[in-house]
Image (cartoon, helix red, strand yellow):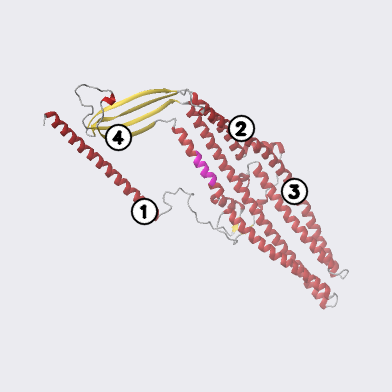
């Protein structure tokens, strides 16, 4: 064997030995990574909540206080609401897309290494030396580098980044809008529970009055002053009111269960509601000022405007793909025939690229983005009209409800006076108890009308607060 052949064999053995060491090191790293992943999997199996962000995993249903105020109810709902969690998850997705679009404007750094064992065709590479074999002897090739790349000017990426930032702002406004919706739902459910409780309490009072009338009538029957028919009539009134009271008690329980469900707390009716703040407060409202306030403060309208802005920026990004892109790249590392036999190499380059013909791809993206702008603008215009309608309707509803409350309060006062006068006439023997029973019926209807009017007023005020974008500010004290 000649000297050149022996040297080639020695080089091959060294290369093979270095390659085996390199592969063994990779296998050790892979085994360690796999063991770590398995350990993490076992830890996650033992503790399912490990690695889950706070507020995203399963939560234990919250107990409600014995006396549930409206402020407490809103606080609990904003903590537990699935509507709010859904809006927050969409904001997280938008934030992720924003980070992705921003990354295109920042330096990209990476590293890579490879070890190869090659036998190449010299003629295929354009190397044709007379007297030399067409194929090379087997040899090792190793390359390990760190890469750095940065776009110095990429207008399309800049516009795409601005568009994703506007989309992120729209998602943030949708979270605020979800909070407004949650507050409105809670106020509505709380008002429904207050209405059921008020109906129960008025029926309880009316049942007591009817029972007193029955006792009075029964005494007069025993004295021979009144007939048995009058006592029978009075007892029927007691039974009728008692039946209504029982129904109202069940309605109150159902309303409390519905409220607990709206709060997404532990479902129970073992609590009481008694907070007049749910009915709101009377405040003068200027219609034009309220509309302007709503268009400025409503988070859903601000989200719609941000969506229009994002769509317009996406059009600019699509158009900017026709502009040149200036970039720079740098790599530095080791190159040779093995990890232990190499030299330092580097590459520094600047690139300038621009599209000449894209077969309609850019035009299609521009058309798609422009269609999205028109859709977003149409949705924003429709929402603006809806907001104006909601504000004016809510103001009208509050004005009407105030009149209803005033009228019903006056009617309750007159009905109670009628009951008292009828009782006096019955006690004096001027009339039988028919007048008293009829008067009590009118009191019952007047009380029910007053309860409905108060509920309507509270709901109208809540709708107005929501319409102008101030529900949480108004009710969460």
45 falls in the magenta region? no
Number of marks: 4
Position in image of residue 89 (x %, y %): 51, 44
Q: Is residue 97 above or below residue 71?
A: above
Q: Mark 4 or mark 2: which comes first in sequence?
A: 4
Q: Which residue is mark 2?
A: 374
4 or 1: mark nearer the eye? 4
| Near-viewer residue (117 or 251) | 117
Task: Write the start and end of the magenta stretch as one range.
Answer: 86-94
Q: Mark 3 or mark 1: which comes first in sequence?
A: 1
Q: Mark 1 or mark 2: which comes first in sequence?
A: 1
1 or 2: mark nearer the eye? 2
How far apart in space, not on screen, are marks 3 and 2 (Cα)? 42 Å
How far apart in space, not on screen, are marks 1 and 2 (Cα)? 52 Å
Position in image of residue 459 (x %, y %): 68, 49
* SS label for mark 4: strand
Q: Which residue is mark 1?
A: 42
Assign the N terminus to one quadrant of the image.
Answer: top left
């Amino acid at each position: 064997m000649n000297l050149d052949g022996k040297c080639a064999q020695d080089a091959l053995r060294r290369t093979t030995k270095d390659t085996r060491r390199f592969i063994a090191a990779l296998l050790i790293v892979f085994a360690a990574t796999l063991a770590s992943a398995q350990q993490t999997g076992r830890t996650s199996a033992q503790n399912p909540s490990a690695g889950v962000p706070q507020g995203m995993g399963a939560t234990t249903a919250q107990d409600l206080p014995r006396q549930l105020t409206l402020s407490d109810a809103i606080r609990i709902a904003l903590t537990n609401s699935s509507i709010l969690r859904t809006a927050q998850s969409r904001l997280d997705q938008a934030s992720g897309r924003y980070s992705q679009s921003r990354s295109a404007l920042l330096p990209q750094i990476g590293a890579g290494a490879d070890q190869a064992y090659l036998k190449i065709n010299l003629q295929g590479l354009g190397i044709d030396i007379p007297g030399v074999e067409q194929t090379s002897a087997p040899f090792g090739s190793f390359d390990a580098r760190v890469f750095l790349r940065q776009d110095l000017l990429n207008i399309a990426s800049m516009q795409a980044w601005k568009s994703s930032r506007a989309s992120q702002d729209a998602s943030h406004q949708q979270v605020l809008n979800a909070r407004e919706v949650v507050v409105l739902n809670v106020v509505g459910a709380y008002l429904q529970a207050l209405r059921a409780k008020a109906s129960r309490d008025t029926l309880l009072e009316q049942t007591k009055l009817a029972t007193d009338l029955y006792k009075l009538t029964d005494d007069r029957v025993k004295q021979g002053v009144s007939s048995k028919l009058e006592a029978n009539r009075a007892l029927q009134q007691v039974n009728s009111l008692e039946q209504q009271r029982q129904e109202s008690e069940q309605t109150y329980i159902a309303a409390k269960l519905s409220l607990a469900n709206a709060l997404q707390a532990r479902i129970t009716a073992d609590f009481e509601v008694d907070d007049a703040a749910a009915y709101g407060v009377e405040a003068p409202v200027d219609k034009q000022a309220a509309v302007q306030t709503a268009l400025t403060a409503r988070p859903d309208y601000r989200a719609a405007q941000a969506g229009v802005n994002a769509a317009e920026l996406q059009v600019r990004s699509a158009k900017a793909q026709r502009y040149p892109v200036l970039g720079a790249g740098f790599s530095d590392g080791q190159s040779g025939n093995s990890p232990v036999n190499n030299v330092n190499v580097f590459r520094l380059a600047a690139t300038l690229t621009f599209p000449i013909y894209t077969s309609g791809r850019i035009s299609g993206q521009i058309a798609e983005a422009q269609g999205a702008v028109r859709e977003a603008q149409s949705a924003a215009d429709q929402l603006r009209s809806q907001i104006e309608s909601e504000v004016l309707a809510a103001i009208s509803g509050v004005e009407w409800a105030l009149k209803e409350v005033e009228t019903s309060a006056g009617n309750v006062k007159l009905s109670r006076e009628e009951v008292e006068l009828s009782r006096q006439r019955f006690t004096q023997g001027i009339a039988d108890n028919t007048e008293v029973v009829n008067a009590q019926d009118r009191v019952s209807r007047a009380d029910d009308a007053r309860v409905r009017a108060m509920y309507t007023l509270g709901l109208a005020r809540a709708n107005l607060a929501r319409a102008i974008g101030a529900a949480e500010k108004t009710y969460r004290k």
